[in-house]
Amino acid sequence: MKFEDIYRFFDNPPPFYLNKELAVCYVLSILLKGESYGTELIALLERDLPAYRLSDTVLYGALKFLEETGTITGYWKKVEGRGRPRRMYQIEPRFQAQAQELSNFWEKYLSGRWRHQNPEV
């Protein structure tokens, strides 16, 4: 290793992959703004927060968890000019408050305030 390697690393650090807990909070933060689908959720994260990544496996695990708990519902929607329908997701109205609370966790995490308020994490 050389010092140049360290500078190069910080000039272009590798992305941070979200775990399932962060993915759930991220997904809810997006769905609070309106319905979405899997590939769009990944694309939005990469576009808006290029330092973060979300694998298909983690995303679909988070979506499955949210569907199984009744927090979100999914339905198939045929999109013009596309062969296969997309699985669209939306928050169930009775879970709006919890979704907002978990979305706030995501925002706090992004701003770095989470670790300051919860040093044991």
Image: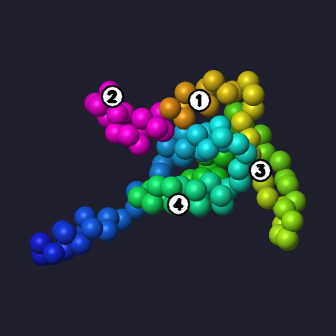
Tell me the quadrant of the picture where the N terminus can be found: bottom left
| Residue 16 in sight in this render | yes
Residue at point 62%, 31% (across, down): 99
Q: Earlier in the sequence, mark 4 or mark 1?
A: 4
Mark 4, Cα crowd under 10 Å, few <14 / some 14-19 / many 20+, is: few
Q: Which residue is mark 4?
A: 47
Estimate the spatial distance between the alpha carbons at disc 2 and disc 3, rounded to whole Å: 34 Å
Estimate the spatial distance between the alpha carbons at disc 1 and disc 2, rounded to whole Å: 19 Å
Q: Position of residue 59 (x, y in %)?
A: 60, 52
User: Which numbered tag is attached to residue 100?
Assistant: 1
Element type where label 4 sits in the image: helix
Q: Amino acid at mark 3?
A: Met
Residue at point 56%, 53% (across, down): 58
Main SS class of the magenta portion in the image = helix
Q: Position of residue 78 (x, y in %)?
A: 87, 60
Determine the residue located farthest toward the left in the rendered image. Answer: 3
Q: Which residue is mark 2?
A: 118
Residue at point 15%, 75% (across, down): 4
Range shown magenta: 105-121
Q: Which residue is mark 3?
A: 88
Q: Amino acid at mark 2?
A: Asn
Q: Earlier in the sequence, mark 3 or mark 1?
A: 3
Which mark is in front, 4 or 3? 4
